[in-house]
Image: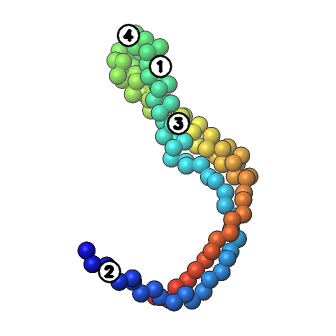
C-alpha cells in the first residue's frame, strides 16, 4: 500500500493554560432506577404478604394477586424513586465538597 501524505495542519492561533475546578457528581438516573427497582421489590414482598382472598370492605370486590401487585407497585415505585433521588442529592452534597484544580491546555486553531 502506498503511503498517504500527512494532512495539512492549520496554524495555531492561540494557546493558553487555564486552571479549572473539577468535582464529581453522581449519575441521578442510576439512583432513580435503583429506587424504582427496590420499589418494585417491596411491592412484590407486600403482594405476597397481603392476602387478597377477602372481600374488600370498601368496594365489595375480591382482588387478584396481580391487581394487588399493581396497586402496591404504583405506590412503592413512586416512594422508591423519591428515596433514590434523595439519596443522590445527599451523595452529591457529600462528594461535591471535594473539588480539585486541574490545568487544561486550551488551543485554538484557524479553520
**In this figure, which residue is indicated by the disc labeled 3?**
35
Crowdedness near tag 2: few (<14), some (14–19) or many (≥20) residues, C-alpha within 10 Å:
few
| Mark 3 / mark 4, whichever is N-terminal | 3
Residue 40 position (above or below residue 104): above
- The reply to whether callout 1 and callout 4 are in contact (CB within 8 Å) is no
CA distance separating discs 1 and 3: 15 Å
Secondary structure state at the residue bearing disc 1: helix
Question: Of the numbered discs in the image, which one, if any, rests on residue 4?
Answer: 2
Which of discs 2 and 4 lies nearer the camera? The answer is 2
**In this figure, which residue is indicated by the disc labeled 4?**
53
Crowdedness near tag 4: few (<14), some (14–19) or many (≥20) residues, C-alpha within 10 Å:
few
Location of residue 86 in the rendering, given as x and y in whole percent from the top left corner: 62, 41
Secondary structure state at the residue bearing disc 3: helix
**In this figure, which residue is indicated by the disc labeled 1?**
45
Labels in figure, total = 4
Location of residue 35 in the rendering, given as x and y in whole percent from the top left corner: 52, 36
**Closer to us: 44 or 100:** 100
Amino acid at each position: 500500500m502506498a503511503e498517504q501524505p500527512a494532512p495539512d495542519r492549520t496554524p495555531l492561533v492561540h494557546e493558553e493554560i487555564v486552571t479549572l475546578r473539577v468535582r464529581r457528581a453522581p449519575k441521578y438516573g442510576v439512583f432513580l432506577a435503583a429506587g424504582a427497582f427496590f420499589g418494585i421489590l417491596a411491592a412484590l414482598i407486600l403482594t405476597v404478604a397481603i392476602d387478597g382472598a377477602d372481600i374488600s370492605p370498601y368496594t365489595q370486590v375480591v382482588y387478584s394477586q396481580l391487581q394487588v401487585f399493581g396497586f402496591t407497585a404504583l405506590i412503592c415505585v413512586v416512594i422508591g424513586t423519591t428515596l433514590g433521588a434523595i439519596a443522590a442529592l445527599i451523595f452529591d452534597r457529600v462528594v461535591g465538597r471535594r473539588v480539585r484544580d486541574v490545568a487544561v491546555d486550551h488551543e485554538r486553531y484557524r479553520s
